[in-house]
Image: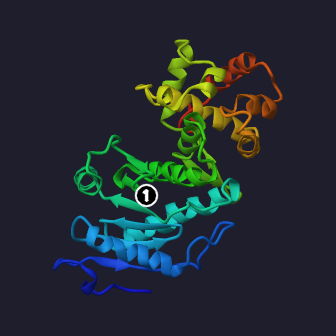
């Protein structure tokens, strides 16, 4: 189904541009979970829920995207950020698409984000950037802050199906790795980002927990860290593994070993070929202190 849908489908008098299009064929992961008709139906269900005029709805498998920027801008986000990331994340990690068709809401600025999240989800957003809500089958973004958070939250949507019991440290470490990302020979790679400075301060102040503690930390404790140090430590552990060519190996072994190694500590030792994580952490901390953001630019 292409082009605008008729107002008979429950849209009020204001005009909503609805674009139900597949700019490319139904590119899938290893599973053909949904058909084009499923996506068209899911997109049509959004019409009576759109929180205001001027929204564009685009089918971008495995998501349905709604945004209140100009239609060509919404489609560009779909093409240049969502499709770009999904294609590379599938190849690198995820054999299955999300178990349900998930909505992505792209709000043009802070005011739109805060207002419409309240209307759609019944509460103000906890993050100024964006979030993933499994219960709402939705991602919501203040897209004015950039596309990095969008890629981060897309990781969570895939992880929920492919590794549903993934601990917070690796779920957030992998997600935040791709907040600042690029293409390297057709693969997605994380780059250094704004979290680096706080992590370097924490290393100098001797405020980091051990890697063994990070791996065994419960989700509630991980998220209680108001300074974001746990996020940064997890991200740059993933970054180290990436730069050593070990990240995808770690993911696959951790996924396979999760029943025996739910926190990933033993798998990390195996992949690093180092049973002494305290010694490794000293090496890693020295390496992190040499990193720069932007990459290669000394302050």
Q: Of residues 140 and 216, which is closer to you in this image?
A: 216
Residue 244, image quadrant: top right
Total of numbered circles in the picture? Answer: 1
Where in the figure is residue 274, as x and y percent of width and height? 81, 24
219 vs 242, left or right, is left
Q: Of residues 242 and 7, which is closer to you in this image?
A: 7
Q: Of residues 140 and 136, which is closer to you in this image?
A: 136
230 vs 133, left or right, is right
112 vs 89, left or right, is left
Residue 288, image quadrant: top right
Q: Residues within 10 Å of mark 1 (few under 14, many from 20)?
A: some
Where in the figure is residue 52, as x and y percent of width and height? 21, 66
Q: Which residue is mark 1?
A: 137
Give me the residue at 35% from left, 73% from top: 45
Q: Compared with residue 276, is residue 188 higher up or lower down, i.e. above or below?
A: below
Q: Is residue 54 visible?
A: yes
Furthest residue toward front: 259
Give me the residue at 57% from left, 41% from top: 171
Where in the figure is residue 26, as x and y percent of width and height? 59, 77
Q: Is residue 299 visible?
A: no
Give me the residue at 75% from left, 29% from top: 266
Q: Compared with residue 235, is residue 104 higher up or lower down, i.e. above or below?
A: below
Q: Of residues 121 and 232, which is closer to you in this image?
A: 121
Q: Compared with residue 106, is residue 285 higher up or lower down, i.e. above or below?
A: above
Secondary element at tag 1: loop
Q: Quadrant of the N terminus?
A: bottom left
């Amino acid at each position: 189904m292409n082009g605008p849908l008729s107002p008979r489908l429950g849209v009020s008098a204001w005009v909503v541009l609805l674009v139900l299009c597949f700019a490319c064929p139904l590119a899938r992961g290893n599973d053909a979970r949904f058909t084009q008709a499923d996506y068209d139906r899911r997109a049509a269900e959004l019409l009576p829920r759109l929180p205001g005029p001027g929204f564009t709805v685009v089918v971008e498998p495995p998501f349905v995207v709604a945004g209140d920027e100009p239609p060509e801008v919404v489609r560009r986000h779909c093409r240049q950020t969502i499709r770009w990331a999904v294609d590379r994340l599938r190849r690198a990690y995820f054999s299955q698409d999300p178990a349900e068709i998930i909505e992505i809401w792209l709000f043009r600025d802070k005011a739109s984000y805060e207002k419409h999240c309240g209307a759609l989800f019944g509460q103000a957003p906890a993050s100024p950037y964006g979030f993933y809500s499994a219960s709402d089958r939705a991602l919501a973004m203040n897209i004015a802050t950039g596309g990095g958070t969008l890629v981060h939250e897309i990781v969570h949507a895939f992880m929920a199906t492919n590794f549903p019991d993934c601990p917070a440290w690796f779920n957030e470490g992998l997600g935040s790795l791709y907040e600042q990302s690029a293409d390297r020979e057709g693969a997605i790679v994380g780059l250094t980002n704004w979290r680096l400075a706080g992590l370097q301060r924490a290393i100098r102040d001797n405020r980091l927990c051990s890697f063994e503690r990070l791996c065994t930390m419960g989700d509630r404790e991980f998220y209680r860290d108001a300074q974001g140090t746990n996020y940064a430590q997890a991200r740059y552990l993933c970054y180290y593994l990436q730069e050593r060519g070990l990240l995808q190996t770690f993911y696959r072994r951790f996924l396979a070993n999760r029943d025996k190694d739910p926190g990933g500590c033993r798998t990390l030792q195996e992949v690093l070929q180092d049973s002494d994580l305290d010694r490794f952490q000293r090496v890693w901390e020295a390496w992190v202190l040499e990193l720069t953001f932007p990459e290669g630019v000394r302050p």
